[in-house]
Amino acid sequence: MLPIAALGDKFFRRLIEIDEDTCRRVAEAGCPNCGGPLHRGDYPRKPRGGLIAVAGEAFTRRLSLCCGWTGCRRRATPPSVRFLGRRVYLGVTVVLASIAALAASRPREVRRATGIPHRTVSRWRAWWQTDFPKSRLFEQERGRFMPPLEVVALPASLVERFVAAACDINAAIVRTLGFLAPLTTASVGDGSRFVRVR
């Protein structure tokens, strides 16, 4: 089982660097709808981190872009390694709290370890077991993992594969978030081509 520990300011600054680079690359590609220029149009978020990612709650801007051509003005929100779609909790919190739930024998242990209500973590666990394996991302990328990922052990089985490649738990978590980044937006197609995690 992977160790669950609080993540500091340095970890989240790294995630912001990745999101900034992704945002720049999406802006360079132009509006996915009309090809027009994209301009920054960030918006506020109130992320929660539980006990795992308290430091991440300070970074409250979701990077976003808006088409500069009159008549289009559509938003193009780049993929993110900080946010996991519209969830209130930070992506890293969703991943690590779900892993903690795998190891816990009682619901109150999850709350004690993560600071997140058991019902919330249970919903995330259900998502990992049902919706995530049916996602386009998982269907397209599952062949990269040999032997195949254990669906019943998600997200731990996913993070463990990146630990083997990165030899560092924090780097593995960052790579996992990069892998999941295309799920964080519907306004930029083929989001994985914009995310670079080193």
Image (cartoon, grey):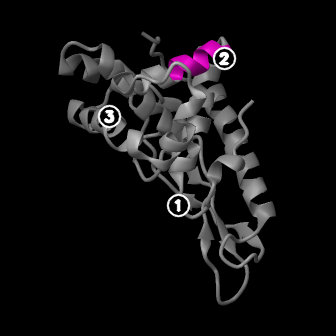
Asked if residue 159 shows in the view, the reply is yes
Q: Three-letter amino acid code at disc 2?
A: Ala
Mark 2 or mark 1: name the one nearer the start of the chain. 2
Residue identified by numbered label 2:
165
Q: Residues within 10 Å of mark 1 (few under 14, many from 20)?
A: some
The span shown in magenta is 159-166
Residue 9 location (% of width, % of height): 61, 28
Upstream in the sequence, badge 2 or badge 3? 3
Q: Mark 3 sits on what residue?
A: 129
Q: Residue 11 at what x, y percent from top left? A: 63, 27
Secondary structure beneath dot 3 equals helix
Looking at the rendered structure, the kind of residue marked 1 is Ala
Q: Relative to residue 141, is residue 85 depicted above or below?
A: below
Principal secondary structure, stretch drawn in magenta: helix
40 magenta-colored: no
Query: Within 10 Å of the Cα at label 3, are there few (<14), some (14-19), or many (20+) other Cα atoms?
Result: some
Q: Quadrant of the C terminus?
A: top right
Residue 167 picture quarter:
top right
